[in-house]
Each structure stands twice: as structure tokens, then as C-alpha cells.
Image: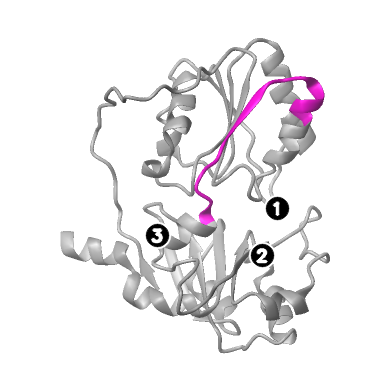
């Protein structure tokens, strides 16, 4: 296990850009992806929304450094959902977005990663459509791509895989999804990236091995990806759960299974940068 360096940013001044960004109008809701954590991965549209909003409704996975970029006059409403902890109901969050928009507010719904990749953005957008509330979707860098990159693990590599699958580690009930065809998943896709799977890692590993994946296949867990608290543990599919427990890894964390994990030994650029700057 190698701990990522504590990296930060120097103060920066926003300069004028030769582009025109869309107006964030009163009564609109913007569903915005904040990326995996590093503020530098925000899109220009995401930063524009942060600086223009009247109300910021944000998730548990949004980094505090990103929240600090928001309009200081904007009201903030926490709408984080964390497994095993008291959380607002999804229907209440969606209805709150409608309520705020109908009050004429510029409503920023800020989500970690991408709002349409395991972010429930589609559910919220459907409620907005039914209520006649205009909205914009601003994609973010999903952790299954950006988070792995910060761990030095590419989602794809020509020598390893021509396909990758993003899989949720739990369904709406909080259990391992019954709807997944584990046999097909195990045999069809060389690289598997699981979101929110730490709680069920033992069962997921067992299902994959039972379906035919090698217990010796490389696997990794990436926690707090792209933040100063990032931790990465590498092991095999059969030993990863024990390694994660021994390292004290806690959510949020990604699980990746496949030969691309071996490339971390060469491509761990973040640790290399830290060593060169020490």
C-alpha cells in the first residue's frame, strides 16, 4: 500500500476566456458532476455554476475544497446519502429541487463524479421533467475513470483489454445486485470496476470466482481517489478483501479487477511526483 502525497493548489486568478458560457437563469436546476475530488478536475461549466448559483444542494462525496469555490452568498443544503447512516430520501431530495426552482432560485445540484453514472441524476431529472422545471446536465469525470487514473491504473490498455464494465456494488436495497448475470459478467469483460462495493467485497469476490474468474487475478481498492487522503491497496481477487481490512480502507472506495492493475507498478505517477518534489 502506498499513500498518495498531500497535494494542493496555489491561489489562482480566473482570467477572461474567449468563450461564452450559458446563463444560469433563475428557476433552473443544473445537475453538475464535481468529479472524483481534485478541484482541478472541475469543468468550466461546473465552476461557472458554483459561482452563479443561489442554492447549492450537494452530496456527501463532494470535496470541501470544491465547496469553497461556491458563491459565498449561496445557501447550502446537504443532501448526502451514505450507506448505514441516516440519509434524506431520494424523493425528498428531488422534490426539494423542484420547490427551490419554483421559488425562482438558481439551483445547483452538485454530485461527486458524474450525475448520470451511479449518481441518481436521471431520477432527479425525471422529476424535474414531470414538474416542468428547466434543467441542464453538466457531466463530471466519473471516479471509475479519473479515480483510477490518479491511482496509476488505466481503465483500458491495448495490451490488456478492449472492454471495461462499470458495476454498482449494491442495489436500491443496499444488497449485492441480484439483477447482475455474474456468469456473463465474469467471462465477457476483462476489466471490472465496482462502485460502492466495499461493504460487499467478500461476496462480490466469491461470486466472480464462482463464475470463473481466477482467484489470482490482480485486483485493487482505491479509496478517497484524487484527494490528499487517497489510499491504494493492490492484491489478488481472492485476497483483496483481507488486504483492505488490514489497511483500514473505508468508503468511498473503488474496486477494480483485471490485468490493468499490474500497470500501477509502472504508472503510479502521483507517488513518483511526490518523490521528485520531496
Marks 3 and 1 close (CB-CB < 8 Å): no
Q: Residue at x 60, y 85 (%)?
A: 238
User: Seen in the image, is 268 located left or right of residue 52?
Assistant: left
Separation (CA) of disc 3 from disc 1:
28 Å
- x and y percentages locating residue 58 in the rendered image: 58, 34
At numbered mark 2, what does the secondary structure look like: helix, strand or loop?
helix
Select label 2 or label 1 by which is in front.
2
At numbered mark 1, what does the secondary structure look like: helix, strand or loop?
loop
Vertical placement of residue 251 versus 162, above or below: above
For label 1, the residue is: 84
Select label 2 or label 3 by which is in front.
3
For label 3, the residue is: 150
For residue 278, say whether it is visible.
no
Q: Is residue 186 magenta?
A: no
Q: In the picture, which quadrant includes the N terminus?
A: bottom left
In this rendered view, identify the residue nearer to me: 154 or 22.
22
For label 2, the residue is: 199
Q: Earlier in the sequence, mark 2 or mark 3?
A: 3
In this rendered view, identify the residue nearer to me: 21 or 242.
21
State which region is magenta: 127-143
- x and y percentages locating residue 25 in the rendered image: 57, 14
State how the image is colored.
one colour
Q: Earlier in the sequence, mark 3 or mark 1?
A: 1
Near mark 1 (Cα within 10 A), the count class, few <14, some 14-19 or many ≥20, is few
For residue 203, say whether it is visible.
yes
Q: Residue at x 55, y 44 (%)?
A: 112
Tell me where residue 125 sits by quadrant: top right
Marks 2 and 1 close (CB-CB < 8 Å): yes
Q: Is residue 141 magenta?
A: yes
- x and y percentages locating residue 257 in the rendered image: 57, 75
Vertical placement of residue 152 versus 69, above or below: below
In this rendered view, identify the residue nearer to me: 239 or 127.
127
Amino acid at each position: 500500500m502506498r499513500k498518495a502525497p498531500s497535494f494542493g493548489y496555489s491561489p489562482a486568478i480566473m482570467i477572461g476566456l474567449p468563450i461564452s458560457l450559458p446563463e444560469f437563469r433563475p428557476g433552473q436546476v443544473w445537475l453538475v458532476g464535481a468529479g472524483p475530488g481534485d478541484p482541478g478536475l472541475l469543468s468550466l461549466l461546473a465552476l461557472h455554476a458554483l459561482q452563479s448559483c443561489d442554492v447549492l444542494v450537494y452530496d456527501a462525496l463532494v470535496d470541501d475544497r470544491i465547496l469553497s469555490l461556491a458563491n459565498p452568498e449561496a445557501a447550502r443544503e446537504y443532501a448526502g446519502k451514505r450507506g448505514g447512516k441516516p440519509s434524506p430520501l431520494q424523493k425528498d431530495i428531488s422534490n426539494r429541487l423542484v420547490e427551490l426552482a419554483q421559488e425562482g432560485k438558481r439551483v445547483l445540484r452538485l454530485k461527486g463524479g458524474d450525475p448520470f453514472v451511479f449518481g441518481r441524476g436521471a431520477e432527479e431529472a425525471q422529476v424535474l421533467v414531470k414538474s416542468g422545471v428547466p434543467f441542464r446536465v453538466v457531466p463530471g469525470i466519473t471516479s471509475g475513470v479519473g479515480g483510477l487514473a490518479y491511482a496509476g491504473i488505466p481503465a483500458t490498455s491495448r495490451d490488456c483489454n478492449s472492454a471495461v464494465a462499470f458495476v454498482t456494488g449494491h442495489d436500491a436495497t443496499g444488497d449485492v445486485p441480484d439483477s447482475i448475470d455474474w456468469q456473463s459478467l465474469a467471462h465477457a469483460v476483462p476489466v471490472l470496476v465496482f462502485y460502492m462495493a466495499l461493504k460487499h467485497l467478500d461476496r462480490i469476490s466469491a461470486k466472480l470466482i464462482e463464475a470463473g474468474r481466477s482467484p489470482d487475478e490482480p485486483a485493487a481498492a482505491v479509496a478517497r481517489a484524487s484527494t490528499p487522503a487517497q489510499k491504494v491497496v493492490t492484491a489478488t481477487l481472492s485476497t483483496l478483501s483481507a488486504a483492505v481490512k488490514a489497511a483500514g480502507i473505508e468508503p468511498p472506495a473503488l474496486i477494480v479487477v483485471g490485468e490493468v492493475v499490474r500497470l500501477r507498478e509502472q504508472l503510479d505517477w502521483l507517488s513518483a511526483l511526490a518523490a521528485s518534489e520531496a
